[in-house]
Image (spheres, rainbow, N blue to C red):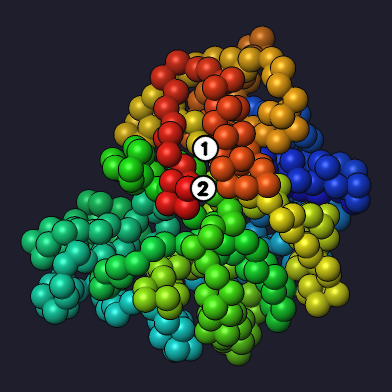
């Protein structure tokens, strides 16, 4: 089987790693990939959907896997399916679950899926009135895609109104913030839970926990994610059952009833309050860096999971996971997340310890190749050090041992990933 992976980050690299070790997979292509993904397959410099479909047809590629949200929201799946090409991901209509927070919240309300109390509006006056009915802190969300940064949690009514004003007048997030969601703050603990869906059936992956803040002890600004671990002991079978019965199954039934069956990754941002899971948001792709921890926990061939979901045949798939833990630590560039940093060479020590070789690896993200083939840190989040172990403590130790082997000017990483569980 030949597979094309659309995207360029650590998420796509980690999917490529899982497929490289899959005996069912012969050739892997990345579009566009990054400076290290050509170690796993071939990078393809094509972004136009029709031209990418031409490439897939020309090379007889069996399956395309879409990593990031933007091509999904823009309709890449529709282009490929119109041409009879197998692709893993939701249609443009179904991708509204991430592309529009207003669509998502209204969908949850229509299908009685538990979530926070909210309003959606483009009226400053209406938003201000609703804010006064809430007890701070208060959550304000831009409707459209904002690269994971369109959600603001503010500590009082005054700052909530300032955030609303900045979104609606376009100064915060441009067109993406011209309509907003204002909602009550849920006080609990947050989880990332992923379901692979084929329109009717689904497989829930081990629950993960992300670390959004830049600094230790959840201090500093929000980022795209500074590390994650899975599975989290904060989830028990009662919570998994509630997610299946109250969230995933009504979502799949509702999407099918509304004429947009959901195929792909349903990423549930969950807040557990008093033992009950409530939905903060949906995304329609793997989280990054959660994907980097989930892929090495997959015991079954990755190709089977993605292919069976793409053709609507998960009911006949046997998907198993290792009874292990994975911890991922993001290494970011010097000025992340405030601004871009100058390119700097990455030096990786020779790994001489067998335990690190066997139980840790790097998922590359914001990297490019220099003129002499050297690897350069060129992105905000440069790479993820992933450790796997029989216990969370073991996986944590492996990840941080690998971190100590990697050097580039200005590197920064948190030292407390998985602290909630450890």
Q: Which mark is residue 422?
A: none
Residue 60 x %, y %: 89, 51
Q: Which mark is residue 228?
A: 2
Pick the front one: 53 or 357? 357
Pick the front one: 103 or 248? 248
Q: Residues within 10 Å of mark 1 (few under 14, many from 20)?
A: many
Taking the spot 25% from the left edge, 73% from the top edge, the residue there is: 184
Taking the spot 72% from the left edge, 78% from the top edge, the residue there is: 201
Residue 242 x %, y %: 53, 81
Q: Earlier in the sequence, mark 1 or mark 2?
A: 2
Q: Residues within 10 Å of mark 2 (few under 14, many from 20)?
A: many
Q: Quadrant of residue 215?
A: top left
Secondary element at image label 2: strand
Taking the spot 54% from the left edge, 78% from the top edge, the residue there is: 238
329, above or below 286, in the image: above
Q: Is residue 210 left or right of residue 173?
A: right
Task: Please say whether residue 12 is visible from this viewpoint.
Answer: no
Taking the spot 12% from the left edge, 62% from the top edge, the residue there is: 156
Q: Quadrant of residue 354?
A: top right
Residue 308 x %, y %: 81, 67
Pick the front one: 143 or 300? 300
């Amino acid at each position: 089987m030949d597979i094309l992976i659309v995207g360029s980050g650590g998420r796509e690299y980690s999917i490529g790693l899982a497929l490289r070790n899959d005996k069912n997979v012969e050739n892997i292509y990345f579009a566009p990939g990054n400076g290290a993904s050509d170690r796993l397959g071939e990078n393809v410099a094509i972004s136009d959907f029709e031209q990418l479909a031409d490439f897939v047809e020309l090379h007889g590629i069996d399956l395309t896997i879409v990593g990031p949200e933007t091509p999904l929201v823009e309709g890449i799946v529709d282009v490929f399916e119109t041409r009879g090409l197998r692709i893993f991901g939701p249609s443009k209509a179904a991708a509204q679950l991430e592309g529009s927070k207003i669509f998502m919240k209204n969908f949850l309300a229509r299908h009685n899926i538990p979530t926070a109390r909210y309003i959606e509006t483009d009226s400053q006056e209406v938003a201000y009135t609703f804010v006064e009915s809430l007890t701070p802190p208060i959550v304000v969300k831009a409707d459209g895609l904002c690269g994971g940064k369109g959600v603001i949690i503010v500590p009082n009514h005054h700052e909530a109104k300032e955030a609303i004003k900045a979104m609606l007048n376009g100064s915060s997030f441009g067109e993406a913030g011209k309509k907003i969601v204002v909602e009550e703050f849920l006080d609990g603990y947050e989880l990332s839970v992923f379901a692979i869906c084929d329109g009717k059936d689904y497989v829930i992956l081990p629950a993960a926990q992300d670390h959004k803040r830049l600094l230790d002890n959840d201090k500093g600004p929000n980022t795209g994610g500074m590390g994650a671990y899975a599975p989290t002991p904060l989830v028990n079978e009662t919570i998994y059952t509630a997610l299946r019965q109250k969230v995933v199954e009504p979502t799949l039934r509702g999407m099918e009833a509304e004429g947009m069956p959901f195929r792909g990754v349903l990423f549930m941002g969950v807040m557990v309050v008093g033992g009950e899971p409530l939905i903060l948001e949906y995304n329609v792709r793997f989280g990054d860096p959660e994907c980097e921890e989930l892929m090495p926990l997959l015991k079954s061939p990755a190709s089977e999971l993605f292919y069976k979901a793409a053709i609507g045949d998960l009911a006949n798939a046997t998907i198993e996971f290792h009874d292990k833990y994975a911890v991922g630590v993001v290494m970011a560039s010097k000025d992340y997340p405030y601004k871009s940093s100058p390119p700097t060479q990455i030096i990786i020590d020779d790994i001489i310890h067998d335990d690190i070789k066997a139980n840790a690896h790097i998922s590359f993200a914001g990297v490019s190749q220099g003129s002499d083939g050297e690897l350069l840190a060129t992105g905000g989040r440069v790479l993820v050090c992933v450790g796997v172990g029989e216990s969370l403590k073991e996986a944590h130790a492996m990840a941080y041992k690998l971190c100590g082997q990697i050097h580039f000017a200005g590197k920064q990483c948190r030292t407390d990933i998985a602290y909630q569980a450890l």
